[in-house]
Amino acid sequence: MNFNEFDFDARIDHNLQGLGYITPTPIQLQAIPPIMQGRDVVGVAQTGTGKTAAFALPILQKLLQRSGGKRGRVLILAPTRELTEQTHQAIDLLSCKTRIRSVSIYGGVNINPQIDALRRGVDIVAACPGRLLDHVQRRTVDLSTIEILVVDEADRMFDMGFLPDVRKIVGCLPANRQTLLFSATMPEAVRHLTKELLRAPVTVQVGDSAPVATVSHTFYPVASDGKRALLERILTETRTGPVIVFTRTKHRSKTLARQLEHSGYAAAALNGNLTQNKRQQALDGFHQGRYKILVATDIAARGIDVSKVSHVINYDIPDTVDAYTHRIGRTGRAREKGEAFTFISEADRGLELAIRKVLGTKLRYCQMAL
Ligand code: AMP
């Protein structure tokens, strides 16, 4: 099946062609029809599956079918600035040459341009909860006209402590609305939220919240003090495209990025200690190929769309199996192949077993002499 069969507005079809999207991904195939019918939808899908277009396309189609003046009609809540910005940009591309306007709202940047954009009128507001509440308090945003609410990456929203803010925001929305909730995993708190916010939802699921199938997984047993040598050896001996290296702490991300730079690699750090400007610079540099390696912490890297990441290297093992899934979602996106390397030291035994259980036979071990 291809996108033509959805009968989208010709402008949307044209934009899809421009982006080179020909066949819908499984989450798009499953989610688009019920969203078009006005149903509430829970989408269990990790980043990299095409979930943004899965909700954005039917939303745009609905907005084009019925014009609504200059009032906010769609609210998309996301846990991080990067994801908010990325969703806003994806919507811009998919709605090119239409009159649909979207704005991204997040903290760490000047609030005034956001106020101006809201005052001029937008159809779609993509927002992080904290800054949006700021606008609610200042009365610079009117949420009473919202027809569709999307809660994206609900599990990360919960991890980051945003659920109380989400509930406050939902309290400002009309009860009579369509609600879509996407999450890579379904912890109890998210199930609970789903029951609270959605009415008779259709659940669509791709994968089993296991890491994307297009990724191959290798574990490298290594002593803690041998990690850097192992990383440099891998980087020298492996043909890689853009690489994301994950560290456990902000400090380790900064130090490792510096060390790699000294060794001659085009590397940048991405962590929550950086200003929004610096973060954006690192991301832009990585997208544009100026940096080949991004050394990131989990939260900073959350939801980054880097479709061509060839390798994710877990310099430090993630804290949970779900976090492994999230990290690996950075590679193997939209059917490209990717590789995931994980450094395993003695202390990581418990998690090693847990991740191994999920990966099953897809996992390889590689012992390198350093
Ligand atoms: P997402 O899961 O929304 O972060 O999307 C992952 C990547 O897949 C993004 O780079 C999208 O541009 C791309 N993508 C989404 N839908 C399609 C499609 N139907 N065909 C090809 N690429 C797609």
Image (cartoon, rainbow, N blue to C red):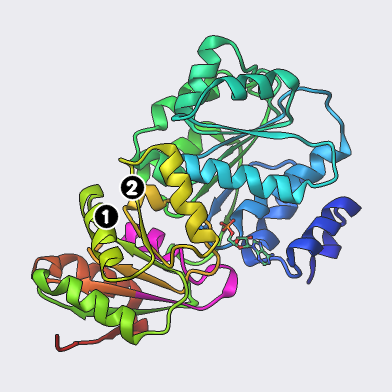
Q: Which quadrant of the figure contains the N terminus?
A: bottom right
Is 5 located above or below residue 8 in the figure?
A: below
Which residues are drawn in magenta? Answer: 319-340
Q: How crowded is mark 1: few (under 14 residues within 10 Å), some or many (20 or more)?
A: many
Q: Which amino acid does label 2 sit on?
A: Asn
Whole-number angstrom distance, CA of label 2 to CA of label 1: 7 Å
Instruction: Determine whether label 2 and label 1 are within 8 Å by CB.
Output: yes
Is 175 located above or below residue 96 in the figure?
A: above
What residue lies at 83% left-to-right and 27% top-to-bottom?
68
176 with respect to 255 (left or right): right
**Quadrant of ligand 1 in image:** bottom right
Task: Name the spot of residue 8 as percent of width and height, x first.
Answer: 85, 53
Name the element at disc 1: helix
What residue lies at 26% left-to-right and 58% top-to-bottom?
258
Is 361 located above or below residue 75 in the figure?
A: below
Q: Name the residue under label 1.
A: 253
- Depth check, front residue: 205 or 126: 126
Q: Is mark 1 within 8 Å of ligand 1?
A: no
Task: Name the spot of residue 142 as percent of width and height, x first.
Answer: 65, 17
In the figure, residue 141 lies in which quadrant? top right
116 with respect to 191 (left or right): right
What residue lies at 29% left-to-right and 81% top-to-bottom?
234
Q: Which quadrant of the figure contains the C terminus?
A: bottom left
Q: Which amino acid does label 1 sit on?
A: Ser
- Depth check, front residue: 136 or 312: 312
Q: Residue 210 carries which label?
A: none
Q: Can residue 147 be seen in this view?
A: yes
Which one is earlier in the sequence, the residue at label 2 or at label 1?
1
Q: Name the residue under label 2.
A: 271
